[in-house]
Image: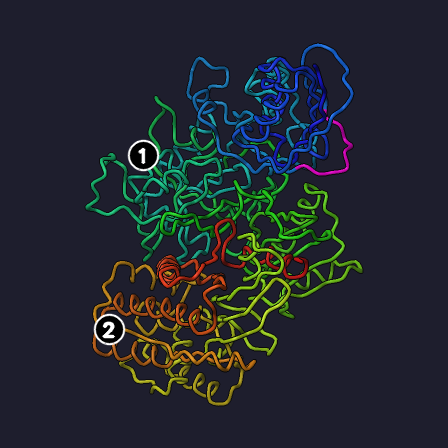
Amino acid sequence: MRTRRRILVRGVVQGVGFRPFVYTTAAELSLTGRVSNDSSGVVIEVEGAARELDEFERRVRCQPPPLAVVESLESTETPVRGGTGFHIADTTRDGGGRTLASPDVAICAECADELRNPADRRYRHPFVNCTNCGPRFTIIASLPYDRDRTSMAEFPMCDACAREYADPADRRFHAQPIACPDCGPTLGYTGPGEGDPVSAARELLRRGGILAVKGIGGYHLACDAANEDAVAELRRRKRRGDKPFALMAPDLTTARAIVEVDDAAADLLTSPARPIVLLPRRRSDSTSTVSEEIPTPAPSVAPRNPDLGVMLAYAPLHLLLFGLPGDPPGPRALVMTSGNLGGEPICYDDADARERLACLADAWLSHNRRIVVPCDDSVVRLVDGVELPVRRSRGYAPLPLALPAPMPPTLAVGADLKNTCAVADGRYAWLSQHIGDMDDLATLRAFTEAERHLEELTAVRPVQLAADAHPRYRSTAWAEQHADGRPIRTVQHHHAHIAAVMGENGLDPAATVLGIAFDGTGFGPDGAIWGAEVLAAGYKGYRRLAHLRYVPLAGGDLSVRRPYRMALAHLRAAGIDWTEDIPSVLACPAGERKVLAHQLDTGFGCVPTSSMGRLFDAVSSLAGVRHEVDYEAQAAIELEGLSRGADTGTGRYEFAVPSGKAARGRGVAAIDPTPVIAAVVADVRAGVPAEIVGARFHAAVARLILALAVEYGTASTPVALSGGVFQNALLFSAARTLLRENGFQVLCHRRLPPNDGGLAFGQLLAIGAG
């Protein structure tokens, strides 16, 4: 007996080959009907025997195409209509729901083979793609995802592409970015050299030039990673200080010659997202059998950093730039960094790039496919073989995250550093791509555009806004300027961190945790700068149980840029004299030392801080590792790098952890770092190497976290770790191990960064969960 069903599939189901998958599945099961896209997702009307219909639903739910994400499947019985065959219908614009946009996806193996095959009509085509790969998020203006709603609308298909596009059996069936050399976007090159654009660009790189390359989500600045002069010049032009550059390799073999790549790292490097992965430099005694002909990255790529950020070529243009068989040789690895000056958003508009990158690049390799919205590369590190995001952007945005309870349409504007925004409606939230630090007018404009685009893709029209409680955050000011009468609710910074990790781990609305939030800065209700907080927290609120004892932050950002000032502040708070046998004291000029002493004595120009990030800075300076920084967390990063693998020996540092009685009496306890500061100074004076001092300090902070869990938590209460300090792999691994070995359930980030890049999600949950 024949029956007919109407099936609505919601999720990431457009632009990922879902309709051809439905078509072929129905054909294999001899079912009739139709499939179409609409604003709700994919709508299927299918008719046949009940047994085959059940099997059809099972395959759709459990065996979708590789890039699809099936969030829900609703099936209802409808009257039998009869008919023959199964066909794919045009997109409809009704449905009253929403579908989800796919992230940009790295080139697949089939398209890479076509790119290299001289007999294929897409041989050397810089824009080869199919339903399994290519640009998505950055070319979509609005949904449903059809070509006329993307920047590919500007390129009418030739007859051959149109046939592929219309053929359900073809890998490019309804691949909206489909193109070929006859009808697709074209490359252009401006700069010295002759020949086709790619060859001229490759030769420029080989000769040590700096190239602006237009990619999927914006412009990169590229140079030969093994050429010290080129890398140093790019660093100088970009005004990047010592901040590490990312590297791009053409393949996994080359990556293995540069960094240590285990199975987990290989899976991540070759995943469809193709993020930048932070990995240890390859050891000189490595037993790897990869070719020794691959040059070592130049020293200026990542000065004094044990890790390198490496990604594999993810666009066909990248593969062409490295060269196909028979091409003249070019660099084996490239520095591939965002096309911008330090602190500015990435360039993605051609005219803007020509203006802003004029003083940075020697030549331009661009194309005429418009980027609708910029999207920087994602950054990930592996801790104990598990993924820990550092920056969530290309390849991940705008995939949704589930919410523990429905909430009304809401916009969260995040924080001022590593900003992302987020929207939510019902049971899902969508985070934007990485936007950047909100200290530049261009970044504020980029934020406005990213927020508008996110609303357009999700069809969320916020009725309320969430913002950080800091009264001078630019993100909060943006919310006030764009509220248009809608209510704004502010969320304390560290509460948002803990709410984010709770939500990411799927805790229900009534859950509570012991939250440990360690970071560099966050505004506290008492006017202090918080940063090492122990919270009894739920989604709806928190209670502060303990914090690192306040020390004066003299001169605000000046003490952030000069860690020796934080070291001197901690010395003064610990009652230790500023003698010049301490590296931090010697690093502070005598005149500045006098002024700083007056500030600390009088409180002039000082604000109290409990920041763990600033304590890491102080210890880095005390150990003689880093006294001034060029980029955020540089002092802590270099201290961590030195400390890896170091033997702590018999030395041991310990914080003074107050009794939990004060917290049970509704008081707030102060954790005293004085014993740690005194022990560090004693070791430094005794000539203990910086790497051992650093290792002992990391171990002390890990033990502190366990002591806090024991003193303020219970065996049945999860311990939630969040905040930028937990990007420190050495600390994070040690703390999580200690907690688990002592019977605690540990909640940590896996899909969002622990830094402020995940804060918007926590803001949503703090005002809406439950």
Considering only order in the chain, which callout, 2 or 1, is on the residue closer to the N terminus? 1
SS for dot 1: helix
Crowd around label 2: few <14 · some 14–19 · many ≥20 (10 Å): few
Verify CB contact (< 8 Å) between mark 1 and mark 2: no
Give how far across and how far down residue 179 sits, in percent: 58, 22
Question: Outermost residue toward the top?
Answer: 84
Rendered view: 135 above or below 417: above
Magenta-drawn segment: 91-99
Rendered view: 434 above or below 273: below
Which quadrant of the structure image shows residue 640? bottom left
Crowd around label 1: few <14 · some 14–19 · many ≥20 (10 Å): some
Rendered view: 707 above or below 674: above
Q: Which residue corresponds to mark 1? A: 253
Q: Quadrant of the N terminus?
A: top right
Question: Outermost residue toward the front?
Answer: 1
Q: Which-is-in-front pick, marks 1 and 2?
A: 2
Which quadrant of the structure image shows residue 12? top right
Q: Main secondary structure of the magenta part?
A: loop
Residue 619 in magenta stretch: no
Circle 2: residue type: Gly
- Work out how far the residue at label 1 is from the one at label 2, CA to CA, in angstroms: 42 Å
Question: Looking at the rendered structure, which numbered label has been put on residue 651?
Answer: 2
Judge from the rendering whether residue 220 lies leftward or rightward of residue 290; answer left or right. Answer: right
Circle 1: residue type: Thr
Give how far across and how far down residue 120 sits, in percent: 47, 15
